[in-house]
Amino acid sequence: MERLVINGGNLLKGSVDINGAKNAAVAILPAAIMASEGKCTIDNIPDIEDVHCLERILRDLGCDIIKIDNNTLEIDSTNVNKFDANTDDVRRMRASYYFIGALLSRFKEARVLLPGGCPIGVRPIDQHIKGFEALGADVIIEHGAVKVKADKLVGANVFFDVVSVGATINVMIAATLAEGVTVLENVAKEPHVVDVANFLNSMGANIKGAGTDVIRVTGVESLKGCAYSVVPDQIEAGTFMIAAAATGGDVYVRNVIPKHLESISAKLIEMGATVEEGDDCVRVTADKPLKAVNIKTTPYPGFPTDVQQPMSTLLSIVPGRSLITESIWENRHKHIDELKKMGANIKVEGRVAIIDGAEKLTGAIVKATDLRAGAAMVIAGLIAEGTTEITSIEHIDRGYPHIENKFRALGADIKRIKVDEE
């Protein structure tokens, strides 16, 4: 097993390059299976465990994959003739449910094991099923798998009961090769939704409205391979912005789309940090005391749920009382108990974390309870007095490429070690 060991107290200074978006890549890679002709060359893919997992699933389904470099894959799915995704990798990761929409769209049939992922709350796929059924598919869940089948898929109007990124993307994928026009309403507007739509359009799809409340998909007969570059990762960028502010540092966060970061920038500015925007970078400096703020997570363009855990670490050392209301997932405050081990003064009431800023955090052995909680613990280690060891870092590796190398390049004292754990 591996751990991250951090000696806290160093200011972060310098620049960091942000990778492609995990949340976009994990949908784009399954969607590549829909190209019945030609190859998809996809670059700016993050070098993370979730992507490696998807590579293995694609190979099992019959894709020929050439790894051009750590961030570029060439995927040839012309010879895929299997629609049963049933490996351990499928069960391991949440985003494997995008294979349902992709396989259904291309083959009119799919069987995909029910997925796992981070334990941050109940994440039903009822809205996905609603969309598939509206398009004409029969859906059965049995023996731990989702089975979908349709004689043909026909465009329909789908109004989602809740705003769901996963359902928006999955049903959009499924509708791409359906007959006629599909209108999706009350959809998610996150940057990675737009990125998946742009990828599908690059393959020959006809999708309009991604990024708005209504997406219109006009079905096409087939899709072809394309060259595509994944959008920068809004969440990785936000994590480094918060880390810069937490350490009182001065960091250029590069290869980003500043517009995607506005809700995070706004909160940091409200706290007293300085955020300067460039064309494809933001500079975060914090050379004066910060102040408490209240945050509520909401769908894009609101404050991202994936950033609230790192933000809770920053607020744990800001004087005064801050409130974080988590409106997306009900179990996204699990990391609070780990922060308390380091001296944080936080209590959770329902979905609200009440944070009274502590004078300091102190190093301890803590656990990454999920992906973004792991990022929160890294930031805690950076600002704590003494040494912090973080266990269960496989969660962090699912979404942050080479996180220790990036922080070390900014001046952090952080390393990865191997340990024998029972």
Image (cartoon, grey):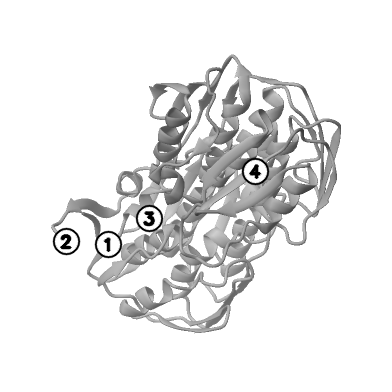
Label 3 crowd bin: few (<14), some (14–19), many (20+), radius 10 Å: many
Quarter holding the N terminus?
bottom left
Name the residue at 35% across, 58% down: 11
- Residue on which the image places disc 2: 421
Residue at the image point whose x is 86% and y is 32% from the top: 180
Q: Nearer the viewer, residue 153 or 13?
A: 153
Which residue is under mark 3?
Answer: 395
Q: Is residue 348 visible?
A: yes
Of the image marks 2 and 1, the number of the one nearer the N terminus: 1
Corner quadrant of residue 373: bottom left
Tag 4's secondary structure?
A: strand
The C terminus - image quarter: bottom left
The residue sitting at 52% across, 37% down in the picture is: 84
Give the side of residue 90 with respect to residue 8, left or right.
Answer: right
2 and 1 marks in contact (CB < 8 Å): yes
The residue sitting at 54% across, 59% down in the picture is 306
Q: Quadrant of residue 71?
A: top left
Q: In the image, what residue type sits under mark 4?
A: Val
Q: CA distance from mark 3 to mark 4?
A: 30 Å
Asked whether the residues under the numbered discs 3 and 4 touch, taking CB atoms below 8 Å apart as contact, a structural biologist would say no
